[in-house]
Image: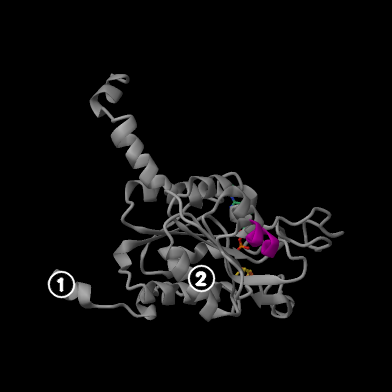
Amino acid sequence: MPETMAQLITLAPKDFRSEVKPTWCPGCGDFGVLSATYKALADLHLKREEVVVVSGIGCSSRFPYFLSTYGMHTLHGRALPVATGIKLTRPDLTVLAAGGDGDLFSIGAGHTPHAAARNIDICVLNMDNQTYGLTKAQASPTSLLGHKSKSTPYGVIAQPMNPVLLALAAGASFVARGYSARPKLLTDMIKAGITHKGFAFIHTQSPCVEFHNTFEYYDQRVEEVPADHNPRDLEAAMRLALHPDKFYVGIIYQNERPTFEITAHEFEQEVRPFDGAAYLSQFA
Ligand SMILES: Cc1ncc(C[n+]2csc(CCOP(=O)(O)OP(=O)(O)O)c2C)c(N)n1
Ligand code: SF4
């Protein structure tokens, strides 16, 4: 088919489904994030070969299998360094990183704030179910105080991490929240995050119906970001993130600054032109 004809074809959400049927439990919140991603990619008129989805390990990290785009299921906690490498090498691609609260805030917690600070242009889909679903429900860094699990039979005694506050404090240039049970809003957040030039962090409450079903809990607490909220105001964004009872969904913060791949490229070109032959001669 001529290139021009191929360009005219717009893919439907179903075209982003792979042949692999999701292995998640029926009702798992991650289905909502996956459908919203199919819809967002189709709405943005992206082609399958223009997108790479990278993940770590966990139920949520099975994400790349279920998309017909390029994908990489890496090591536990290592989605962001791999996604960063892909974006640096191929800045033309849309790079998504998918992972759970464990993957991004336990074992991968060393990478998340640094990727945000660098402002690498990738979009992170964090599916937070407040537990380690894959390994059968140990407590995670976002489990609430008192949460009983196999690893905390008397209840969690540590304060939970606040992923939205952490992303804001680390310097993410786009921070949004979604909820699996609100697919339309979640699709809009994913579209906005992909379109944003810089590190986009989308925190989604995505309940684990098998071990820690919090749908009812979040149904009672989820509220849209107030209409008069200014997403460029970092302090106002932090106040929303810190609200003790409400769980604000929508764009919490957005600002523009140079992305890491552009700064790195300019550095290579202007500050330290790379002499490949001289570099290799050190190892001769
Ligand atoms: C190096 C390493 N340590 C531990 C594990 C075991 N492990 C697999 S998934 C997981 C936690 C997953 O939790 P989360 O990222 O929240 O994903 P969920 O399954 O809840 O979607 C752990 C501890 C592993 N696979 N590799
Ligand atoms: S164990 Fe929980 S997180 Fe994993 S697929 Fe089942 S419902 Fe989803």
Residue at coordinates 51% horizontally, 55% vertically from top-left?
Answer: 173
Residue 151 vertical placement versus 42 (above, below)? above
Q: Does the segment drawn in magenta span residue 250?
A: no
Instruction: Name the residue tied to disc 2.
Output: 189
Q: Is residue 237 magenta?
A: yes
Question: Which numbered disc, 2 or 1, marks the residue that appears first in the sequence?
Answer: 1
Q: Main secondary structure of the magenta part?
A: helix
Where's the C terminus, which quadrant?
A: top left
**In this figure, which residue is indicated by the disc labeled 1?**
4
Tell which of 5 and 280 is nearer to you: 5
Q: Is residue 22 visible?
A: no
What element does badge 1 sit on? Answer: helix
Q: Secondary structure at mark 2?
A: helix
* Closer to the camera in the image, 6 or 197: 197
Q: Is residue 186 above or below residue 271?
A: below
Q: Residue furthest right?
A: 154
Alpha carbons under labels 2 and 1: distance apart: 30 Å
Residue at image position (36%, 66%) is 69
Q: What is the span of residues highlighted in magenta in the rendered image?
A: 235-241
